Amino acid sequence: MSLKDKLEEVAHYINTEYPELNFENASVSDSF
């Protein structure tokens, strides 16, 4: 597994577990 794949996996996990910290989608309106 490449580092990029690992980072994407972690980012997906964070977006799933902590949607208020959604940093892949910079739109604030989507977070709230």
Image (cartoon, rainbow, N blue to C red):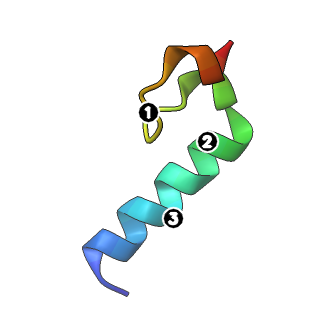
Instruction: Decide which of tag 1 and tag 2 comes sooner along the chain.
Output: 2
Q: Which mark is residue 32?
A: none
Above or below residue 32? Residue 8 is below
Above or below residue 32? Residue 31 is below
Q: Nearer the viewer, mark 3 or mark 1?
A: 1
Quadrant of image for the C terminus? top right
How far is mark 2 from mark 3, CA to CA?
10 Å
Across and down, in percent, residue 28 comes to 52, 15
Q: Which residue is mark 3?
A: 9
Q: Which residue is mark 1?
A: 23
Residue 1 picture quarter:
bottom left
- The answer to whether the residue labelled 1 contacts the one labelled 2, judged by CB atoms less than 8 Å apart, is yes
- Say which of 4 and 26 sits in front: 26
Q: Which residue is mark 2?
A: 15
Tell me the amino acid under the disc marked 3.
Glu
Above or below residue 5? Residue 20 is above
Instruction: Decide which of tag 3 and tag 1 comes sooner along the chain.
Output: 3
Across and down, in percent, residue 2 comes to 29, 83
- Which residue is pictured at 48% across the width and 50% down the height? 11
- The answer to whether the residue labelled 2 contacts the one labelled 3, judged by CB atoms less than 8 Å apart, is no
Q: Dot 1 surroundings within 10 Å: few (below 14), some, or many (20 or more)?
A: some
Across and down, in percent, residue 4 comes to 29, 71
Query: Please, what secondary structure does the residue beneath circle 1 have?
Result: loop
Tell me the amino acid under the disc marked 1.
Phe
- Say which of 23 and 10 sits in front: 23
